[in-house]
């Protein structure tokens, strides 16, 4: 599955083949969309980093992963069945 960023990159690769066909307004739209998506990603990252409880959980998950605490994780099969 592609992320929005992957899709955008694929679209940009397609567009670069036809740069001469792009109008100034279309180029402005593409630039606006790229900037808007990046700003949203930064906002989401900042929201996560500002949440002390969530950051603590992320740090604990990293420790659990490094120390191979398998009981701290749910298997993909169990997660799909929920």
Image: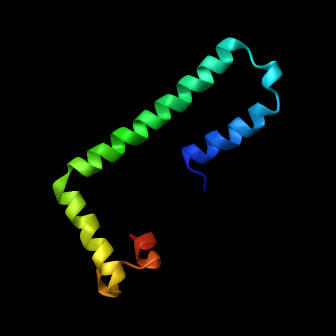
Q: In this view, does 68 lie above or below 41?
A: below
> 74 or 31, which is in the foreground?
31
Residue at the (75%, 31%) spot, across then down? 15
82 is higher (above) or lower (below) than 20: below
Going by the image, does 39 lie left or right of 14? left
* Residue at 30%, 44% in the rendered image: 46
From the top left corner, tell me how far across and down residue 41 is, in percent.
42, 41
Above or below, comparing residue 40 to residue 54 in the picture: above
Residue extending farthest left: 52
Residue shown at 50%/29% (left/top)?
35
Is 37 on the left-hand or right-hand side of 16? left
Q: In which quarter of the image is residue 14?
A: top right
| Residue 60 against residue 44 in the figure, above or below | below
Q: Quadrant of the C terminus?
A: bottom left
Task: Report the quarter where the N terminus lies.
Answer: bottom right
Q: Residue 37: horizontal and vertical position, in percent?
A: 49, 35
């Amino acid at each position: 599955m592609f992320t929005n960023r992957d899709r955008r990159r694929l679209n940009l690769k397609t567009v670069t083949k036809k740069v001469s066909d792009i109008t100034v307004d279309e180029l402005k739209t593409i630039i606006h969309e790229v900037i808007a998506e990046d700003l949203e990603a930064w906002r989401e990252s900042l929201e996560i980093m500002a949440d002390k409880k969530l950051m603590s959980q992320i740090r604990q998950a990293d420790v659990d992963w490094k120390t191979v605490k398998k009981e701290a994780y749910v298997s993909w099969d169990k997660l799909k069945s929920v």
